[in-house]
């Protein structure tokens, strides 16, 4: 980074980490804050039940489709610059959404907000990788980053319910204004600009990846609404796969690719991308459908449903903050394995739910397992995905992490909606049917998490040094190999 000496960079690490975490927290909160406010949005603007899902899908489509382009723009134009531009676009779109008078107005600017998030999200992780070198410092920073993701999801549900019940769903978007503009000023003052890379911009790669990602995400969210056998679903997913294959061919030949294929040379990183997709695919079932169980079966209000997730949030915060110490003791991959085991156990437990399940023993206790597991797993997954990446590739690697995150959640939700619709019980009635379907979703989510665990065991765990050798290295003052921290 220019203009700052290593000593000055060291002094600013705390402030930069706070800026990065706050901006990423804003993105995550915005995704979940909408969920509990959807009924009020529907009534206020006159959305139909079918079109209401696009309040979330419009954001997802732009976010997922533009991630690689946003990441590469940060590499070429400077990560601080793209960080601020992404924040500005996201914040201004939030203002317009908050005053939206019609469904079309809201959906248009939710799309723009997603584009801002696609620019902002890769920049946050890339700046973190630039300010914190591999080893204990980066492990600590990434654990806080992962904690922000988990805490933000639950905080968004609570805030969404609070605003919807006591104020207005619009307040959930207005709250982004002071936060966004404050972060832009802080970033301009405290974050150093990264060097620009002069050279050829991979236009063909950018276009094919954006269209391919957009088509895939569109097909996935359409499948969640109309089914996997719908002609438009099949056409969109087929077109997306074809465009992504074309994208890989282009990237193999490009001199300065938007996504350097050398990122896939490491089995460790490939395992991290696949495991992250499966992890998010399974966990999205918990967040999305547990909310419906709490409100539709147990009869909770939006605010009560948001607060009911605290058994997940609090353990996750404690464990995520302890990740640096746990990694030093057990190793990154071993901690990841343990976290996934906790998550699988929690989802299997939730799969036993029925209309008569009490909250405390049937929901809150497995939520604790999920909080521990998610807190232990997200940080190590992120660490593995950016380990050993060259400085010039940090933006692309960060974009790829977010692509895996976004695609995993979208694909998982599409699959789980099909599971939800297919689950039936002849004897079930009313809330019993809803509870049965949600329990089936939790079982399917557990299967996805189990596949994520198998991926970690096959590709990530073998890369970790045995604890004995790690202890020997520590005793003589040597750092472990980068792939193993």
Image (tube, grey):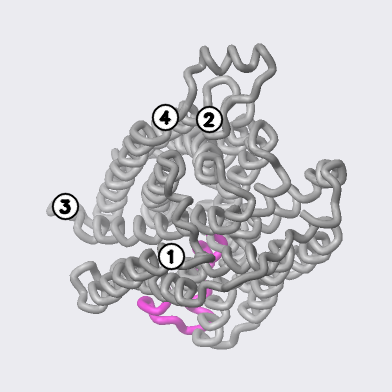
* Label 2 Cα neighbours within 10 Å, binned few <14 / some 14-19 / many ≥20: many
Residue 256, image x, y percentages: 53, 65
The image quadrant of residue 100 is bottom right
Q: Is residue 328 above or below residue 286?
A: above
Measure the C-alpha gap from mark 1 to mark 2. Answer: 29 Å
Magenta residues (range): 32-52
Residue 431, image x, y percentages: 30, 55
Q: Secondary structure at mark 3?
A: loop
Measure the C-alpha gap from mark 3 to mark 4. Answer: 41 Å
Q: Residue at x 33, y 71 (%)?
A: 240
Quadrant of the snapshot with the N terminus: bottom right
- Residue at the spot of label 2: 484
Measure the C-alpha gap from mark 2 to mark 3. Answer: 48 Å
Q: Secondary structure at mark 2?
A: helix
Front-most of 296 and 62?
Answer: 62
- Residue at the spot of label 1: 251
Residue 40 colored in magenta in the image:
yes
Residue 125, image x, y percentages: 62, 52
* Label 1 Cα neighbours within 10 Å, binned few <14 / some 14-19 / many ≥20: many
Say whether disc 1 or disc 2 marks the residue closer to the N-terminus: 1
Q: Is residue 399 above or below residue 381?
A: below
Q: Secondary structure at mark 1?
A: helix
Residue 461's disc number: 4
- Residue at the spot of label 3: 425
Front-most of 454 and 246?
Answer: 246
Observer able to see residue 312: no
């Amino acid at each position: 980074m220019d203009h700052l000496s290593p000593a000055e960079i060291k002094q600013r690490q705390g402030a930069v980490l706070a800026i990065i975490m706050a901006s990423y927290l804003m993105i995550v909160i915005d995704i979940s804050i909408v969920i509990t406010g959807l009924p009020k949005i529907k009534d206020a603007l006159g959305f139909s039940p079918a079109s209401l899902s696009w309040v979330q899908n419009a954001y997802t489509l732009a976010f997922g489709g533009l991630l690689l382009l946003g990441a590469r723009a940060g590499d070429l134009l400077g990560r601080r610059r793209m960080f601020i531009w992404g924040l500005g676009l996201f914040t201004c779109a939030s203002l317009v959404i908050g005053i939206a008078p019609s469904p079309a107005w809201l959906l248009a600017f939710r799309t723009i907000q997603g584009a801002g998030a696609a620019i902002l999200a890769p920049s946050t992780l890339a700046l973190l990788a630039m300010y914190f070198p591999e080893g204990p410092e980066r492990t600590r920073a990434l654990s806080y980053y992962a904690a922000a993701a988990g805490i933000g999801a639950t905080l968004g549900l609570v805030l969404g319910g609070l605003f919807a019940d006591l104020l207005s769903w619009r307040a959930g978007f207005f709250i982004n204004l002071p936060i966004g503009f404050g972060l832009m000023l802080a970033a301009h003052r405290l974050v150093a600009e990264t060097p620009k890379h002069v050279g050829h911009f991979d236009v063909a790669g950018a276009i094919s990846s954006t269209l391919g990602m957009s088509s895939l995400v569109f097909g996935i969210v359409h499948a969640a609404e109309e089914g996997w056998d719908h002609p438009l679903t099949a056409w969109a997913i087929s077109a997306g796969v074809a465009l992504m294959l074309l994208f890989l061919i282009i990237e193999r030949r490009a001199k300065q690719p938007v996504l350097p294929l050398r990122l896939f040379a490491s089995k460790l990183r490939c395992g991290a991308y696949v495991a992250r997709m499966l992890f998010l695919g399974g966990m999205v079932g918990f967040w999305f459908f547990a909310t419906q169980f709490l409100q539709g079966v147990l009869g909770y209000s939006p605010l009560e449903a948001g607060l009911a997730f605290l058994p997940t949030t609090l353990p996750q915060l404690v464990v995520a903050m302890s990740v640096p110490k746990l990694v030093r003791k057990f190793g990154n991959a071993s901690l990841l394995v343990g976290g996934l085991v906790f998550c699988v156990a929690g989802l299997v437990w939730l799969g036993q739910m029925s209309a008569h399940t009490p909250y405390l023993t049937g929901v809150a206790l497995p939520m604790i397992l999920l909080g521990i597991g998610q807190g232990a797993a997200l940080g190590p997954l992120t660490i593995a995905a950016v380990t050993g990446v060259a400085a010039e590739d940090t933006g692309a690697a960060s974009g790829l992490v977010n692509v895996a995150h976004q695609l995993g959640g979208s694909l998982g939700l599409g699959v789980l909606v099909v599971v939800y619709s297919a689950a039936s019980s002849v004897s079930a009635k009313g809330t019993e049917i809803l509870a049965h379907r949600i329990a089936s979703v939790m079982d399917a989510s557990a299967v996805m998490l189990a596949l994520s665990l198998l991926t970690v065991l096959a590709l990530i765990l073998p890369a970790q040094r045995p604890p004995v050798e790690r202890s020997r290295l520590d005793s003589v003052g040597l750092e472990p190999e980068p792939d193993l921290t």
